[in-house]
Amino acid sequence: MRRLVSLGARHEEATEAAEVPVAGTRPTKTLSLTVLVRLGIVAVVLGVAAGGIWFAGWLGTPAAGPTTTDIPALDIPEADVQPGAAAPVGATVVGEPATQPSSRPGTETGGRPVLSIWADRVSAVTGIPARALIAYGNAELQLRESQPGCRISWATLAGIGRIESNHGQYAGAVLRDNGYPSKPIIGVPLDGSPGVRSIPDTDHGALDGDPNYDHAVGPMQFVPSTWAKWGGGYDPQQIDAAALAAAKYLCAGGRDMSSAQGWWSGVLSYNNSVDYARKVFGVADSYAKAAQGVRVS
């Protein structure tokens, strides 16, 4: 049986610290992402802060179109963990951050950037596209320098990316070497129909192709109004930009994403759904455990 689902909306007001049930030099903004699970899990989306990112380009207005009838998160089980009780295990990315669009990430080893070598090896044990891993790893490395107290992990960003767009591969898209999906990732119109938040157009259709209502866009699913505040002038379809923006949002307010309380607060502020957070937890934890044995040198 076909499952009616959609890419939905995020809330427009950033929450500095989401409340965790018992057992984010740019304006603070909200991230847009969604996971609507069959017959009724509506994602409430928040935004993200963005800084210097590489490979920004690819201008143009995408055409609005229908969302497919499946999303990556439907077959992902929820982790059996109580909110606030634990954070996913840690795993360290290797390399140096790229801070300019023309920069190549990481220290060179045998003619190749260390981050690229790390991404290839982690891809082999996790199934995440290496190009997506470069984006998640670069975001962790940049935040390690700019906000060392946050301790954001590439694995958490990868968990979110898996659920939001299958790492930029949603609806048959292919993640290209320049960090863009082969076709724009655009969610359903946020027109207030059943199970969907109503967000009238805020970008004149520039990012989502719809002059009437906003849509969540890109690998990490931002609504245009949140991207305008946190996107740094880059394109939400570009995975380096989107991953870095997500990392900065999750780190907002001095949050420590390595702690149980901080991790759940961050992920629930990104999408205020315990079911969603448990899915992210399970995926992030499995990615980190698989990558713990990876060595670059």
Image (cartoon, grey):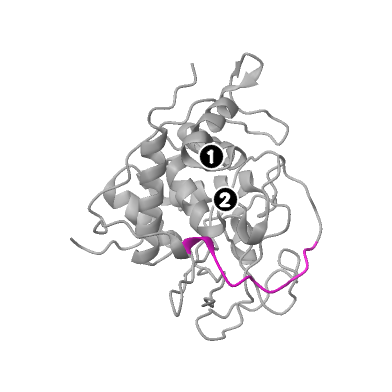
Describe the element under mark 2 as helix, strand or loop.
loop
The residue at 53%/79% (across/down) is: 196
Relative to residue 61, is residue 262 drawn left or right? left
Q: Pinpoint residue 267: horizontal percent, then vertical percent.
A: 40, 56
Which amino acid type is marked by label 1? Ala
Measured from the top left, where is residue 156 in percent x and y? 43, 47
Farthest-out residue, right? 60
Mark 2 lies on residue: 167
Residue 77: x percent and y percent?
Answer: 37, 60
The answer, for residue 149, to whether it is visible in the render is no
Q: Secondary structure at mark 1?
A: helix
Say which amino acid is labelled 2.
His
Asked whether 16 or 101 is in front, the reply is: 101
Question: Which quarter of the figure has residue 70?
Answer: bottom right
Q: Which residues are magenta?
A: 61-73
Determine the image quadrant of residue 60.
Answer: bottom right
C-beta proximity under 8 Å, tags 1 and 2? no
The residue tagged 1 is 139
Q: Earlier in the sequence, mark 1 or mark 2?
A: 1
Disc 1 vs disc 2: which is toward the camera? 2
Q: Is residue 61 above or below residue 106?
A: below
Please tell me whether residue 279 belongs to the stretch shown in magenta: no
Q: Residue at x 59, y 48 (%)?
A: 50
